[in-house]
Amino acid sequence: MIITKQKPIDDILKCLEKVSSVYIVGCTQCATVCKTGGEEEVKKMKEFLESKGKKVIAAEVWDTPCNLLEVKKRARDRKADLEGSGSLLLMSCGDGAHTVVIGTGMPVVPANDTLFLGQSERAGRFNEVCALCGDCTLFITGGYCPNALCPKGLQNGPCGGAKDGKCEVSPDIDCGWLLIYNRLKDTGKLDNMKNLLPPKDHSRAIRPRKIIVDAVKNRK
Amino acid sequence: MTLKEKIKNKKFIITAEIGPPKGIDIKPNLDEAILLKDKVDAINVTDSQSAVMRLGSLAVSRLLKEEGIEPIYQLTCRDRNRIALQSDALSAAALGIENILVLTGDHPSRGDHPGAKPVFDLDSVQLISAIKGLESGRDMAGKELKGIPKFCVGAVVNPGADPIEPELIKFEKKIKAGAEFFQTQGVYDAGAFAKFIGQVKHYNTCIIAGIILIKSPDMARFMNKNVAGIFIPDSLIKEVEAAPDKQQKAVEIAARTIKELKGLAQGVHIMSLGWNKLVPQILDKAGL
């Protein structure tokens, strides 16, 4: 899931400084789970903006703002309202915000900052466990990713900076390599850690990445 | 004899360390180093230590060499990708610098430019391999070099790491990658160090034990609390507390520790943290 966090409300207001009427769009998926763009948050945002003297043309939760075809369909259905607003306020991830720019042709202000690909531990608690590196080595490191869990992304073991099992970067971060070590040890696979791993091939993750699924590519 | 030759010939190695300044006023550092010229085998030059931006370790290493002092050029993975790391290693060789100490480097968030992009394109094991590759005449892309450099590649190990096993696994990888010597984190407990040596003796590699001067009880407590793998016993802190002359006490403790470690390690690396003028006294008292 894409983890988002709402921008400071003053920053959002500043972005909407020259806008008198706003069209608010939330997302039924990730942003709903993150409580940054579900029904409740969209409603709250509407009330807040109205209290600040803005006209809210619409406050909707779309399924989903990151789907270009869906967005284009919405753009056709809601053409008059969209064109009557000064800007959209996207309570989604950056993917949603960009897709709505493309799909509606309207100016868009993002209400959220997009943070990471996250595991949902339980309601409202999210952890970054995958760094989207494009070259998965979880089978070597016991299912714990050193690129995501070690702030230095080291491939061959701990840096030596951890104290009491915590990373030198912050006492709130467990040493990723200690997690890997413990897991490999517990599962009898410590030999995995003894192999010298080569540097990562960063050419596999040159931005912007794009993919066409084979099944689609081969369709006649 | 160069450091590389001394290591090979199992000589007892004495190294010290200087940290380049923030700025270009290098004279005080050079004066400090010159004082140690005939007392130590080589002097480490730190690479923007603690992720605090400073004058470069390569330039200062070269300046030491011009003074007739053998430098150990510290190179971290923190700020450079594989292109810059290999290029800097070649630059070192072209400047007549043979010794490179490879380190991961502290995370930038710990330093004075916390917003800097952390690079860590290679880790310390991979960087050792890359430098050994240059010595064999090829870069990491397999391309042939015009003129082949020669290095003496060192690495670090922390005998106080807890748990020790992951540290030992990485230590072994560094040896396999080609590390020729190791400098350790500061050692204060010869007994614990002896235990570590027992665990690594069979690798038959050169271990140079780290000595960090205790400048004050507060510094000792700070290190115990914040520095990984450092354990300064309470008795030592009390001893420093009771001493009227902190510098003399630092000399005495360092000399005593060196005497205890002499038979265990192949050398000592004295990190004086600005008190390099005391190093000759320490060596004298330690009988070196």
Image (tube, coloured by chain):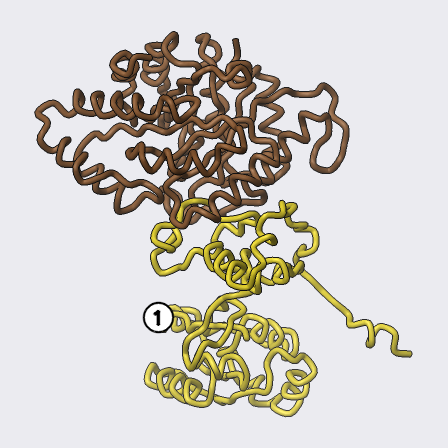
Chain colours: A yellow, B brown
User: Up-down: is A122 above or below B197?
Assistant: below
Q: Which residue is pictured at 59% across the width and 90% down the height? A: A80
Is residue B154 left or right of A160 when viewed as pictured? right
Is residue B213 left or right of B107 when viewed as pictured? left
Q: Which residue is pictured at 38% across the width and 48% down the height? A: B162
Given residues A124 and B201, the one toward you in this image is: B201
User: Up-down: is A190 above or below B246?
Assistant: below
Q: Tell me the chain of label 1.
A: A
Q: Position of residue B229 (x, y in %)?
A: 35, 43
Given residues A194 and B214, the one toward you in this image is: A194
Is residue B121 left or right of B218 when viewed as pictured? right
Tag 1's secondary structure? helix
Residue to which mark 1 is pinned:
A10
Q: Which residue is pictured at 63% across the width and 47% down the height? A: A195
Q: Amino acid at mark 1?
A: Asp
Q: Position of residue B106 (x, y in %)?
A: 42, 42
Q: Position of residue A185 (x, y in %)?
A: 52, 58
